[in-house]
Image (cartoon, rainbow, N blue to C red):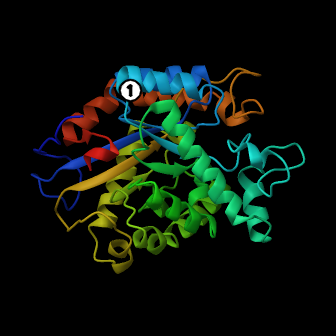
Amino acid sequence: MGSPARIQGRPNLHGMSPSAEIKLVVTGDDFGYCPRRDMGIVECFHAGGLSNVSLLVNGSSAASAADLARRFKIPIGLHANLSEGLPVCAELRQNSTLINAQGVFLGKMGIRKSLAQGLLNMSEVRQELQAQISLFRVLTGQNPQHMDGHQHVHILPGIREEFARVLQENDVRYTRLPVELGLHRCIWIREELMEFNRGVEKDALNSVEVFRSHAIRWPNLYIGLSTMGNKMSVFNIQRAIEYGIESLDSSLSEVHSMQSLPWQPGTSVSIELMTHPGYPSLPHEGGCGEGPDDFSQSSERLHELEVLKSSLLQSYFNKTGMCLCSFKDL
């Protein structure tokens, strides 16, 4: 990735100096979930719609996805998974608090329920996270540039403390903080999904001091809760970024207290846009040990792919002077 471009004549980005820089990390999550998802992610990278990927090491195509990242020099991090499929650590595939009676992780809501009931063994959480980092190194030949959580498990209470320790011990310096400033203004989000998103943001805000105390960093802004699936459009991405920058430039103390990277009003800003593009998974192909879920088989993956590859989005990036980069460039 090249050096960030200087922005000249930026349209509609309130509060930022025309000479400020915008570093935009566009992350394709779930790399390694299935070959069709991986194919779309690689196409998206070549089209300039992605600058970074997040690998599921327990995904069915993790090894071939790692090879693709190596071949095409795609910046890659770890998508830590504690909620879908099979554990990486062989010791945890039997008699573990992380799995159900079928021997697979408890699911997006199941892990949250089990956590609330105090049923998760945190030493097992740590053991599995370490096993996933170790496998990532074997598959890619490198340390993760960043590490986040599949279905935002890395910010859940109790888990976030173990997550932060494991990152610090393994010299992983960057994570994702899924607090989307301006989310309340995104009126296109269904109320039931907005309720889940509010819970994600609450957990993320409660993770700030934990992550900061372990020297973990994250971009100034996060976008992604408001632009998933069929809600992704060039217009919605543009609005979400603008809402975020307007909120970031405000004088609200809670906005500035959550920052990890240095930032002052009117100066350069870093943003992560979370995405899930790819060709839809076929039944019985892909997944993390139990087949692909409905989310991966839906047409929404293809919709995201088409938006990210569109010339209209590329034009928006160019006109605003945004430089797509990876976490190592922040």
Quarter-of-image position of residue 37: top right
Residue 214: give x, y in percent of width and height: 43, 68
Res. 109 in view: yes
Write down the quadrant of residue 242 in the picture. Answer: bottom left
Q: Say how many tags the image has.
A: 1
At 57% from the left edge and 38% from the top edge, which residue is drawn?
135
Residue beneath the point at 33% across and 60% down: 220
Furthest-right residue in this view: 101
Mark 1 residue element: helix
Q: Is residue 228 visible?
A: no
Q: Residue furthest bottom?
A: 253
Q: Nearer the viewer, residue 129 or 42?
A: 129
Residue drawn 57% across the image and 58% down it: 154
Q: Is residue 306 above or below residue 325?
A: above
Name the amino acid, label 1.
Answer: Phe
Callout 1: 10 Å neighbours few (<14), some, many (20+)? many
Q: Nearer the viewer, residue 150 or 133?
A: 133
User: Residue 101 or 188: which is nearer the viewer?
Assistant: 101
The residue shown at (56%, 70%) is: 202
Which residue position is annotated with label 1? 45
Vertical order, 121 against 149 (above or below):
below
User: Where residue 237 sits: x, y (%)?
Assistant: 40, 44
